[in-house]
Image (cartoon, helix red, strand yellow):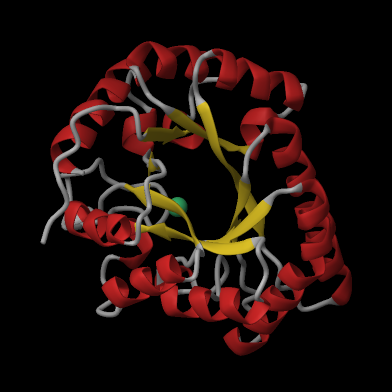
Amino acid sequence: MSAEPINDLSRLCVHTITTKPWPIEVAAEQFAKAGVGGITVWRDALANRNIAQTGQLLRDHNLSVVSLCRGGFFPHTDAAGRQAAIDDNRRALDEAAELGAPHVVLVCGAAPGQPLTESRKQIQDGIAALLPHAEAVGVKLAIEPLHPMYADNRSAINTLAQANDMAEELASTHVGVAVDVYHLWWDPTLEAEIARCGRNGHLYAFHICDWKTPTLDFLNDRGLMGEGCIDIRQIRSWVEATGFTDFNEVEIFSNRYWSEDQAQFLEKIKHAYLNHS
Ligand code: ZN
């Protein structure tokens, strides 16, 4: 069974990195003008700004602040590096609270000099160390599994099963997962694992874009919905079958699209969202 087609933009969220050339003030104005319902803020977009005022500016444009991206990068081969990561994640939680974002998305990290099993342990320990602060500031943490091509240095959490296992072991009201079709579309257990995190109340976020063939750059050649091989509508149906009614977040890193006129690109996003998501 596929999901119902999307008829309006009320559940469309766009990540600030998707339209990276725009400062966040311009993004807010343009997203609002385009009828976009939500915005996920990347931390670099907040540099040299008053974060609370920026959050207010977004809400003044009728944009829901969906997430703050991103924390994580817990594993390091030395203790000082691991502690610095925890300190930085604590700052990310503070920033999310100031901004008014309900959760911080975690790109969990991996240290090339150590086994993935050790990195996973450090990730779990790092998240556990943050939990008291997350609860104190009222901001949740969303573990985002990354495609295995990033297992060397960006994330040792590569499947939704691993993220679900970790969220369940941490057993906190403040830890869940983020499902990104780009990272997870290939996984034969995806439907079951989406159902599992939905059952547990752990499904915090849903990210969409497409996987192009060929992909020319590991990081910055994501496609617009409909440009690649991901059955986004099918995956959205699994997400919605859990009762998820939150935003569909368009997260595209693309050297090609960043070099285009961003207003035209936003029109393409709207079209792709309504026709291919
Ligand atoms: Zn994502």
Q: Which residue reaches farthest left?
A: 1
For the residue pair 85 and 257, the one nearer the viewer reads as: 85
Q: Position of residue 202 (x, y in %)?
A: 51, 64
Q: Is residue 109 left or right of residue 195?
A: right
The residue most toward the right is 80
Q: Quadrant of the N terminus?
A: bottom left
Seen from the viewer's position, the closer of residues 165 and 268 is 165
The image quadrant that residue 87 belongs to is bottom right
Residue in view at x 37 percent, y 63 percent: 183
Residue at (34, 66) in percent of width and height: 184
| Vertical arrangement, residue 178 with respect to residue 210, above or below | below
**Left or right of residue 237, residue 42 in this image:** right
Q: Is residue 94 above or below residue 78?
A: above
Q: Quadrant of residue 45?
A: top right
Can residue 49 be spotted in the picture? no
Q: Quadrant of the C terminus?
A: top left
Question: Residue drawn at (74%, 39%), measured in percent from left and top?
Answer: 97
How far across and how far down the image is residue 222, in percent?
Answer: 32, 48
Residue 242 at x, y = what percent? 34, 61
Q: Is residue 40 above or below residue 69?
A: above
Q: Residue at image x 27%, y 30%? A: 269
Q: Is residue 104 above or below residue 45?
A: below
Q: Does residue 187 appear to the left or right of 80 in the view shown?
A: left
Asked whether the viewer can see residue 167, the reply is yes
From the viewer's perspective, tell me whether residue 14 is left or right of residue 104. Answer: left
Q: Position of residue 63 (x, y in %)?
A: 50, 23
Q: How many marks?
A: 0
